[in-house]
Amino acid sequence: MLIKTSDSLKFRNDRSAVRLVASIGAVALLAIGPAACGGGSDVAPDQGPEGSVKKSQAFQAPAIETGQKVPEGLEDETGQALIAVLQAEPDYSSYVKLLQLSGVSEDLATGDSLTVFAPVNEAVQAQSRLLDRYLKPKDLDSVLAALGKGVQPEIADPEGLSDLMRRGIANGELPPEAVKAGLKLDPLAGDTLRITKSGDDFRVDGIRFDTGAGTLASNGILYPAAGLIAP
């Protein structure tokens, strides 16, 4: 899956079990509707009475049923749950430890029909200041080292850390060909997420993610991301 991480997010693009599904794009685009698509450019989201995004209009893709062909652009890991896919990839080890510390790993083990924007290790380290506010001691490296030894450190803000980790997990399975600028997603925590496009890069709430290196698990879709999505 991943072979190298950097600021530009370089990923391996080999796919061993990818098969084209002609119907998935049509189904996903029908679910999105014209109001959610931006024709390849940034689109302002619908505003509520006080200028907030209307969460009821967030896109929630239907689950990809067991036995369906894997959408083009996704690696097939349908024999494993999302958390197992993450645990098997060393480049996600820091993210996995934070999921376990916050208790959110259970969402990825037992939840259904999810899209996960998972930061690789370098991306987690780059956001140490953000994470330190939730940790005790306020030192990401020390906390990760303790977790690696099986020691459970204290959490300064358990609810805040849980919300941070759950914000990068959205309801609905979003296949690569349904990703559009202006698309809105319903996260497990916090306000509606919005997809934007800058050049060739897609971003979710400003965080780049790689639509060409996604993985389909038994209970959702996983995309490598350039960071955690802050509340």
Image: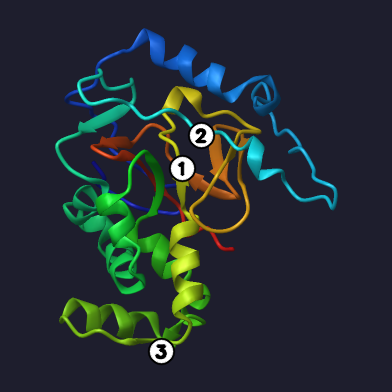
Residue at mark 1: 171
Q: Earlier in the sequence, mark 1 or mark 3?
A: 3
Q: CA distance from mark 3 to mark 2?
A: 36 Å
Vertical comparison of 172 with 226: above or below: above
Disc 2 secondary structure class:
loop
Tag nearer the camera, 3 or 2:
2
Secondary structure beneath disc 3?
Answer: strand
Q: Residue furthest top?
A: 22
Above or below 14: residue 87:
below
Number of marks in the rendered image: 3
Amino acid type, label 3: Lys
Q: Position of residue 92 (x, y in %)?
A: 28, 57
Tag 1 near tag 2, CB within 8 Å = yes
Residue 106 to residue 224: above or below: below
Callout 2 amino acid: Gln
Which residue is located at x 15 percent, y 81 percent?
149
The picture places residue 169, in percent across and down from the top left corner, at 44, 50
Task: Identify which residue is drawn at 16% across, 80% down.
Answer: 150
Residue 60 is marked as: 2
Q: Circle 3 sits on which residue?
A: 136
Cα–Cα gap, marks 1 and 3 = 30 Å
**Which residue occupies 52% across, 82% down?**
133
Q: Earlier in the sequence, mark 3 or mark 2?
A: 2
Of label 1 and label 2, which has the lower sequence position?
Answer: 2
Amino acid type, mark 1: Asn
Q: CA distance from mark 1 to mark 2?
A: 6 Å
